[in-house]
Amino acid sequence: MSVGSSTGSSPWRLTSRQVSIIQMLTKTGSEPITVSAIAKKLGVSSRTILRDMPAIEAWFAENNITFVRKPGVGLMLQEKPGTIRQIQELLDAEQVKPAYSRRERRRQLLGELLCAREPVKSYVFLSRFHISGGTLSHDLDALNDWLSVCGIQVIRRPGVGILLEGNEFGCRQDAANTAFETMDERETL
C-alpha cells in the first residue's frame, strides 16, 4: 500500500518505545517477529508491548501501511522495501513522547507528589506514563519503602487520590536527596 502522511490532532502521537517497536518491524521486513522477542529486546514485559499495539496499529492504518498479526507466528509488515524506507522517514518526522525507565518514572512520580498541594488522582499518572494500575501500585510501594526512612508515607485514598504524609523536615530532606541524586556531578561543583 502507499504511505500517507500523519495528520493527527495531537503532536505527540507515539512514545519512544512504540517507535522502537515499529523500527524492529521494519528491520524484520516480511519476516514475523513475536511479541515476546520484541519485549525481550526492549527489556519490558509482553503485556507492555501488547498495550502499545493499538497506538501502533492506528498509526499504521492512518499511514496506509499493511500490518499483519498472525497468532502463534508473530507480527510483520507486508510492504515493499521502498515503502519500508518511507516508514522510517515518517518516524523521523514524528514528535515522540518519552518512555520513561522504571527509575525515571519513579523519580517523576516522587517529584509530582512532593510538589502536589492536594491529592493526585491515579489516572494522571496512568495517562502520563502509559502504565497499568499494577505498575503504578508497584511504583508507589517502592516509593513508600524508600520514603519511610525519612518518616514519610505514600497514602492512597480511593476516590480522593495519592498524597504524601509525614513531617515537613522529612519531606524537605527527601526533596533535597532527590534533587541531589538527579543532578549531574558537574552541577554540584
Image: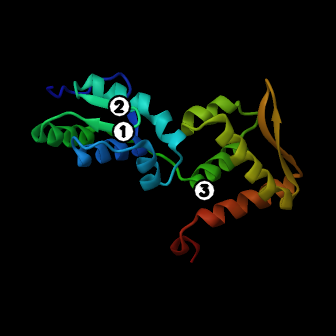
> Is label 2 in contact with label 1 (beta carbons under 8 Å)?
no
Closer mark to the observer between disc 3 and disc 2: 2
Q: At 42% across and 33% down in the image, what residue appears?
A: 53
Local packing at callout 3 (Cα closer than 10 Å; few below 14, some 14-19, many 20+) is few
Residue 11, visible in the rendered structure: no
> Residue 65: percent from the left, percent from the top?
23, 28
> Residue 87: percent from the left, percent from the top?
21, 38
> Residue 119: percent from the left, percent from the top?
76, 33
Residue 155, visible in the rendered structure: yes
Q: Quadrant of the C terminus?
A: bottom right
Disc number placed over residue 103 in the picture, else none: 3
Q: CA distance from mark 1 to mark 3?
A: 33 Å
Name the secondary structure under disc 1.
Answer: loop
Q: At 66% across and 49% down in the image, what residue appears?
A: 111
Indicate which disc, 1 or 3, sits on the residue closer to the N terminus.
1
Q: At 35% across and 25% down in the image, what residue appears?
A: 58
> Residue 114: percent from the left, percent from the top?
73, 47
Q: Quadrant of the N terminus?
A: top left
The foreground one among 63 and 34 is 34
Q: Classify residue 41 as left or right of residue 160.
A: left
Q: Which residue is mark 2?
A: 69
Q: Which residue is mark 1?
A: 73
Q: Amino acid at mark 3?
A: Arg
Disc number placed over residue 43 in the picture, else none: none
Name the secondary structure under disc 3.
Answer: helix
Name the secondary structure under disc 2.
Answer: strand
Q: At 63% across and 32% down in the image, what residue appears?
A: 124
Local packing at callout 1 (Cα closer than 10 Å; few below 14, some 14-19, many 20+) is few
Q: CA distance from mark 3 to mark 2?
A: 32 Å
Q: Classify residue 55 as left or right of residue 143.
A: left
